[in-house]
Image: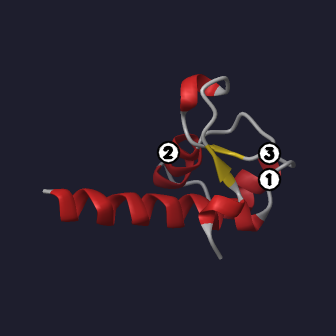
Amino acid sequence: MSYQDRITIDPLVRSGKPCIKGTRIAVADVLDYLGGGMTATEILDDFPDLKPEDIQACLIFAAERERRLSVAA
């Protein structure tokens, strides 16, 4: 799976933060929920527009960004 299939960056949506396509839910929001202890199931229950693949795409996005930052340092 490629996160680009599910994540978009649009300067007109949430000031250009990476968001799940078709929503205003930012990748950072999903990561914050997971980091705060919510399960993927709880997130999906709270946001019925999301799919499990959206949460997976957020994790892939974050991992790839971390790799890019590590290489640049």
Q: Quadrant of residue 13?
A: top right
Q: Of the residues shown, which amino acid type is indicated by label 1?
A: Leu
Left or right: where 46 falls relative to 17? right
- Residue 20 lies, in percent from the top left, at 69, 47
Left or right: where 27 falls relative to 23? left
Provide the residue designation for mark 2. 32
- Which label is found at residue 72? none
User: Which of pointers 1 and 3 indicates the residue nearer the eye?
Assistant: 1
Q: Between residues 23 and 73, which one lies in front from this camera angle?
A: 73
**What residue appears at the point 70 percent right and 60 percent down from the top-left corner?**
54
The earlier-in-sequence mark between 1 and 2 is 2
The earlier-in-sequence mark between 3 and 2 is 2
- In the rendered structure, are the residues bearing label 1 and label 3 in contact, judged by CB atoms less than 8 Å apart? yes
Task: Report, in whole angstroms, how far the alpha carbon at label 1 lies from the one at label 3.
Answer: 6 Å
Mark 1: secondary structure = loop
Mark 3: secondary structure = loop
**Disc 3 packing (10 Å; few <14; some 14–19; many ≥20):** few
Mark 2: secondary structure = helix
Provide the residue designation for mark 3. 47
- Which label is found at residue 50? 1
Q: Of the residues shown, which amino acid type is indicated by label 3?
A: Phe
Left or right: where 56 falls relative to 67? right
Q: Between residues 3 and 54, which one lies in front from this camera angle?
A: 3
- In the rendered structure, are the residues bearing label 3 and label 2 in contact, judged by CB atoms less than 8 Å apart? no
Q: Of the residues shown, which amino acid type is indicated by label 2?
A: Asp
